[in-house]
Amino acid sequence: MTRPIVCLTVLVFVFYCVATLSVSADGDINQQPVSTPSRDVLTEQGWQRVDRSIERGLAYLMSRQDADGSFSTKEDGQPGVTSLCVMCFLANGYLPGEGKYGDELSKAVAFVCSHQTESGVIASGHPSGPKISRDFPHQLGKSVAYNHAISSLMLCEVYGMTGGSDERVDQSVIEGCLDASLEMYRWPKPRRLDRGGWRYAQKEDVDSDLSLTGWQIMFLRSARNAGFDVPAKPIDEAIEYVLSCYRADHGTFNYYILGKGDRRSRGMAGAGILALAHAGLHHRKEAVSAGDWILKTGFDHYNDQKTYEQTRPFNDCYHYGVFYCCQAMYQLGGHRWEAFFPKTSDVLIRNQRWNGSWAACNSSGRPYGQCYSSALSILALSSPNQLLPVFHR
């Protein structure tokens, strides 16, 4: 596959140096020695098969872009789903305003930016004004937090990959995103167990979960890579929260901390590993154990919620899980990556539909449609590319 050349060699090198010097859970600077995952996990023909699948998926996404620049999904999935779609293109060397897809990506980025309110929050349905509101109906309250974190991450990756030259994504946009994320981090958390994490935009009994915390850590990591002033304390405390979600009796991470409750899922296993990797803690025992759990659980039964639930009680979105786990296993590298990616990528490619899409999730992700499931699948297959700075090892 022929991809545009991203002429940012020096900038990417700077990103890499910053990303490998990460703040660990105890606040120390920690440079982890990590080996590059082998490219020999697939033959050259195998990699060409992956590339063809990705290009078909990108073409499908473009066929579902609306006139306003958004990618098709339900209303409360915007602009998060559009941001996931944009990241698919970034992960394969396509940039807004440049080359193939340049105009379409510029429109998508402008659509996302148009959802930023005075408070810095990026989400559909969030009221205007300088204050972040927590007074939402239940479903909208959930989606606001996800839309903001995912959209902030995408915009920050655009800012970093273009060297801040994209006029739609200037420094003030990212600073507004940071202000909103840090305000959400400071929301009162009566349960001591919840401190350090993020949760939905409406008040609940549980005030932090690993899923949202993982996206916010990604955004903060991306912002720091791009040169923004991100305080160390929220990152350190977020990593402590992630470690608290680990369950030694299960050998993996829970969705949130709730006594002996079983809240395992493939997505949360990947989220825990990836969050630790962002802090330079690739080889902590918790990450290694969760990687082994992912290998045992696997993704052999494509989008088959019933089969999964026979052994795991917690709701698990196949595509969300495969996105997180591909990124996580690449971070772990070694034999875990070698055992995981060939089989998982084969399942994804064999189940790609005739039009380049992947079927909607057979779980809670179903309402967000095929752009959502397809974007997550493309990002999973793109994990070895290492073009998105936030996923650099």
Image: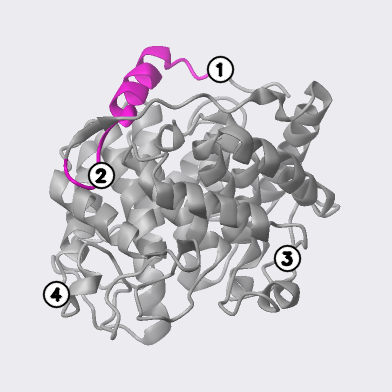
Q: CA distance from mark 3 to mark 4?
A: 37 Å
Locate the N terminus by quadrant: top right
Give the x, y percent position of residue 165: 33, 27
Front residue (pair 256, 135): 256
- Comparing 57 with 72, the one in front is 57
User: Do the residues bearing badges 2 and 4 touch, measured as CB atoms within 8 Å?
Assistant: no
- Is residue 322 within the magenta segment? no
Left or right for 331, reference 32: right
Query: Could you say where residue 326 lies in the image, as x and y percent from the top left?
Result: 59, 45
Q: Earlier in the sequence, mark 2 or mark 4?
A: 2
Sequence-wise, the earlier of marks 3 and 1 is 1
Labelled disc at residue 174: 2
Identify the residue at image location x=31%, y=41%.
Answer: 279
Q: How many marks?
A: 4
Mark before the other along the chain sequence, 2 or 1 = 1
Q: CA distance from mark 2 to mark 4?
A: 24 Å
Q: Secondary structure at mark 4?
A: loop
Q: Which mark is residue 5?
A: 1
Report, in whole angstroms, how far the alpha carbon at label 3 lies from the one at label 2.
35 Å
Return the residue at label 4: 188
